[in-house]
Image (cartoon, grey):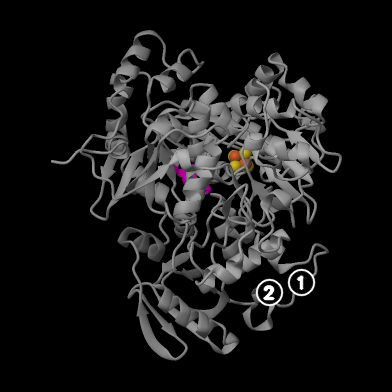
Amino acid sequence: MTGTTLYDKIWDAHLVDADSNGNSLLYIDRHLVHEVTSPQAFEGLRMAGRTPRAPHKTLAVADHNIPTTNRAGGLDAIDDPESKLQIETLEKNCAEFGIDYLPMDDIRQGIVHVAGPEQGFTLPGLTIVCGDSHTSTHGAFGALAHGIGTSEVEHVLATQTLIQGKAKNFRINVVGDAPSHVTAKDIALAIIGEIGTAGGTGYVLEYAGEAIEALSMEGRMTLCNMSIEAGARAGLVAPDEKTFAFLKDRPRAPKGADWEQAVAYWQTLTSDEDAVFDKEITIDAAALPPLVTWGTSPQDVIAVDGHVPDPSDIADEGRRKATERALDYMGLSAGTPMQEVAIDRVFIGSCTNSRIEDLRAAAAIAKTGKVAASVDAMVVPGSGLVKQQAEAEGLDRIFIEAGFDWREPGCSMCLAMNADKLAPGERCASTSNRNFEGRQGRGGRTHLVSPEMAAAAALAGHFVDIRDLKAEG
Amino acid sequence: MEKFDKLTGIAAPLDIINVDTDMIIPKQFLKTIQRSGLGKNLFDEMRYTPEGDEIADFVLNQPAYRSAEILVAGDNFGCGSSREHAPWALLDFGIRCVIAPSFADIFYNNCFKNGILPIVLPQADVDKLMDDAKRGANATVSIDLESQTIKGPDGGEIAFEVDAFRKQCLMQGLDDIGLTLQKATAIDDYEATLDAQAWR
Ligand code: SF4
């Protein structure tokens, strides 16, 4: 008999029922909820006279709509009546159904995928869902974590299970040592550039290899976060000592004998030596440059020292048309060196890159200069706790002195549902995960980069090859 | 959920690959706490100018396609966020079926929960239907879920695959939650095993 993969193991351990159609009922250990994708689910429960089956397995926080300035005034100070109503609705629903909620003025409030791991709500070997596609982030802990739609949010609330078909296994081996300034973000972009935004559709990705083992937990979260950009619902990294060290003593992590028992179990969560993957690729981290996207799909990646691609070089008609459309939207001409592309805005934040390590990396660059006069740059920490830690380390002062805006935690300009957005035609170096048309504001142009590349672009006013800079520690 | 068995309607060609959910329904419309009313903002940024005027050449603004019920699109339709607002917006506009060479996973799933049939076909078949759709209002397409076939305007049948369970739910308009709650004992039994792992 051949061995099983990490995904197979977690799947098998959560199977409640399987029918002959290949549809399975999977038990869900943890459910994260935010204000945008939940109101209709709670409404559905109410209309059907149902109640949550296990309310203590759910944790809610408002992040998408929340303002990143002037938070002292609380809910009443939110200008946008629709945003306010959504946050209010979440608060009410949580109170009515007995669900734990991290309030707006609580230090633990933050982007749901930053706050969950911080609280130790995310643990290895669990199934975790949220009405948000970047739930894949939590796979960094060796949890099977993926996004669901609102009907499924309602289903999980009512039954603590999900009807699922099993995905296939896809292992991505990232071998070699990543050079300095090549971050988890660059590895993620390189993978998507290689397999494409549909390359992972129907698969669960497992990231393995020495470059993955070398990543911090923050880096693994950045990587797993972007699994969905490769079309995969979930990405996984097998838990190891770094995982356990990150989780130990977190508020919701197990304690005492439970901790010992849990760790003993978590140590079994690896793919067997003889496990068979349906698909497997290998990427050499040592050969990677810092990357930047040029187009409107996360697969549109290019080395920072590269040039805007030329559609006439592309044989496939669909691709060529998509490239032409993207270049037109992005206001770029074929052949332009990426480093000559001037930017207007910089956004350092989002569930991809707003953790303490990301802010440290960006601050190390910010320290070396001032934000260019032509650039408006902002830093939005992923949670209140990240913000507090950054302030304790003096990172806020570094950013502010360099001319960055230092904001309150939330999704902010990652999706521009609040006041933080690009004006039409504005060009942004962003540490977020999606460069779709209009993602950061109608007509806005997004280039995805790592935190240090974003900070360097803020100072220079255009993209720069971070390897040419000397960062101060 | 509305049942889906047979549908004969106008198919609109949306000849773009990687149509993402931000295109289908931009985030400024996600602030609603309801499911309905999103149809007018379907494809908002492709459909209207920033001033709110219709962009005449966008497919759904053309007279022939204003009452389209079927969408024929390129590869990887529905990629991006998990927002169920995307199928809600399609449905509210009147689209009951999307045909493409491939779909993003979460979107595909969300369609079935809302009475929309997403059909995956080989590129050649999609190309054929795309050509048909481009002929405008005279070109109706018929879909029969029971027999899993599509008929184009010139006759000729295309067969498609669909998961048996999802097909049954769609044809009967079944609510997933109700179905799962019939398995409550299995869930109870599973939860009883969790006592051995208190940390979970
Ligand atoms: S930061 Fe961006 S990607 Fe992450 S949950 Fe918020 S909106 Fe979604």
Q: Viewed as shown, does residue A271 lie left or right of A344?
A: left
Looking at the rendering, the stretch of residues picked out in magenta corresponds to: A148-155
- Residue B64 magenta-drawn? no
Measuring from the top left, give residue A367's x and y in whole percent. Answer: 74, 25
Asked which secondary structure carries label 2, the reply is loop
Residue positioned 30% across, 18% down in the render: A264
Q: Nearer the viewer, residue A293 or B200?
A: A293
* Element assignment for label 1: loop
Residue B11, compared with residue A112, is above or below; it is: below
Q: Are marks 2 and 1 in contact (CB under 8 Å)?
A: yes
Query: What number is the disc on residue B58?
Result: 2
- Which quarter of the rendering shows the C terminus of chain A? top right
For the image, the number of numbered tags is 2
Question: Label 1 amino acid?
Answer: Glu
Callout 2: residue from which chain?
A: B
Where A357 falls versus B124 (above or below)?
A: above
Q: Is residue A153 magenta?
A: yes
* Residue ID at (41%, 83%): B151
Q: Is residue A38 left or right of residue A454?
A: left
Percent x, y for residue A344?
79, 46
Please report the residue visible at 79 percent of the width from the left and 29 percent of the height from the top.
Answer: A369
**Neighbour class for label 1 at 10 Å: few (<14), some, many (≥20)?**
some
Q: Is residue B1 visible?
A: yes
